[in-house]
Amino acid sequence: MIKSMIVSSLEKPFLGDPIEKYQPLTFIRMMKNQRLSIQLLHTLKDEGTRAMPKLHISGGLEACAHAYTVEQVPVALPVWKDGQYDDNYLSFEPGLYPDWLQPLHYGGRLSVVRDQLRAVWIDFDPQDTLPAGIYETTISLETDTGEAVTSDKITIEMLDVDLPEQEMKLTQWFHCDSLAHFYNCEPWSERHWAVVENFARTAVKNGINLLLTPLFTPPLDTAVGGERLTCQLLDVTVTDGGYSFGFEKLDRWIDMCDRVGVKFFEISHLFTQWGAGHAPKVMAVVDGEYKKIFGWETDATGPEYTRFLRTMLPAFLDHMKQRGDDKRCLFHISDEPGESQLEQYRKSKAVVADILEGYTMMDALSNFTFWEQGVVTTPIPSNDHVEKFIEAKVPGLWTYYCCGQSRNVSNRFIAMPAWRNRSIGMQFYKYDIAGFLQWGYNFYNNMSSVDSINPYTDPSGEYWVPAGDPFSVYPAQDGTAYESTRIIVFHEALEDCRAMKLCETYYGKEKVVAEVEKAFGGEVKFDRCAKSSAQMLAVRARIDEMIADALYLQKKKRSRTTRK
């Protein structure tokens, strides 16, 4: 006998869980341009070892439905067991965890296995093509003859309104070298360009609108003295008088970004990570030979690299101005400098500060002194250090998280529950967060990029960081990106924020925050995340209910006006 149940996107069922552990989802609202995700749990009891029913969706939304199996991944390092965790995890133990989404195989059939609880992920993505209304949706598992073996129902109300456009800038660092490694192709070969575009398209689908743009190979997560595979968009030639530059690959990159919907370009860091002490790897043609001209051996503020930057940046900006794209660029100096490196950071920034005046210069750092002393005007503190920056009313405040944000705050480790991942949306809204950064969209390397890794067997970067931190998409065989449940749930958090902004247009921000906190059961802060799917769903349900009420009153008012 097959058992099944519709549940929300916020559940992460383990293979050994009883289906009775979960509560069915029977009603949910969405907007006309929202991507709504739910899951169908299924298991086989009492007889046989495996059944192969077909998935069938009916009720009016089937044309915009996309189904995937939720695949398990081996997690050897779910969390650091040295006190850097709290009680809001699914498990602290190694094992198989649900994470990546695979399009249905077997011609649409499901492999329902005895005494194993598995899930089908179902996205409804109407993209504003369907009318508002009530959609009584049935999800069935059927025999080849069309007989329903199981049948589960959910009522989906599509409100007659669109979510507003995403205002917040969002970047997850896009690693071109990882794609060249995994697909065994030459950087910037036609195969590489095709893969890059596929991955960029999936990034945009999930709210990423700012793409890390490697003018030079990004000096990120690289061993001192080591190198990452060269992925440099800017062509450089050393001449008798200095340097000349070619922008053909950069132009192709921008055109690709325009095709997939990228709005902004995050120019890769001009100096090395953790201190801004050296130059990134820069390759150039010297007397007909393509070779490295700057790197770890280059002092960040030495005369030759200074001359190079002060030649390159004006040429780059002139080219971008000619395209009309210069204001789409945001710049980095160095990633995650500490207080002991403040003076070096200040000196390195001074090399380019006058040239980049008027452009956003931002960096991930959590030491308040950098902003307090005016060294960084757009700081990006981690979400476990952001409160001090909020109290200081830093304008246009960003935040980020990475491997270190493992206690109390939201993150997207595989071992964390999805409701914790999604909690960040209401935090973004309450505190008017202007941008968010996360370092691993598709980082398929180990620590310091000494080697590449297989993301399907090791989502911790070879036991380096908690599983899931280095990437949120998986490389498919055909050169496209498989989404994880984590990246979609994070996108749901972005949609929560947008729904709250829509709600604000009817009620004002103070009222929306008060209702969110009432539904949440306490004050919304970055160090307070939901502790259950019900708690997180209640927040969004209250916002949707307020919007539905406002739409009803608007319609009623229009009706009265028409009668008059």
Image: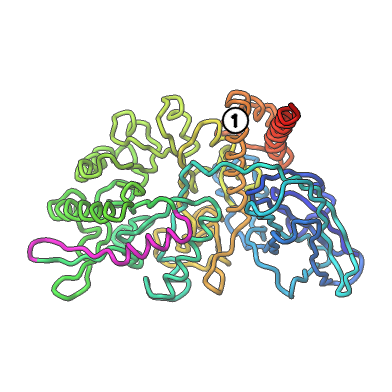
Q: Is residue 23 visible?
A: no
Residue 464 drawn at (x, y percent): 49, 56
377 up-or-down from 145: above or below: above
Res 102 quadrant in image: bottom right
Judge whether residue 247 is colored magenta.
Answer: yes
Region in magenta: 240-262
Res 406 quadrant in image: top right
The residue carrying pointer 1 sits among few (fewer than 14), some (14 to 19) or many (20 or more) residues within 10 Å by Cα, namely some
Front residue of 381/464: it is 381
The residue that appears at 63% across and 24% down in the rendered structure is: 511
Q: Is residue 530 left or right of residue 438?
A: right
Q: Is residue 451 visible?
A: yes
The residue that appears at 62% across and 48% down in the rendered structure is: 416
Residue 461 drawn at (x, y percent): 50, 60
Q: Secondary structure at mark 1?
A: helix
Residue 404 drawn at (x, y percent): 49, 44
Q: How is the image coloured?
A: rainbow
Judge whether residue 248 is colored magenta.
Answer: yes
The quadrant of the picture occupied by the C terminus is top right
The quadrant of the picture occupied by the N terminus is bottom right
State the residue position of label 1.
Answer: 504
Q: Is residue 30 left or right of residue 237?
A: right
Residue 534 drawn at (x, y percent): 74, 39
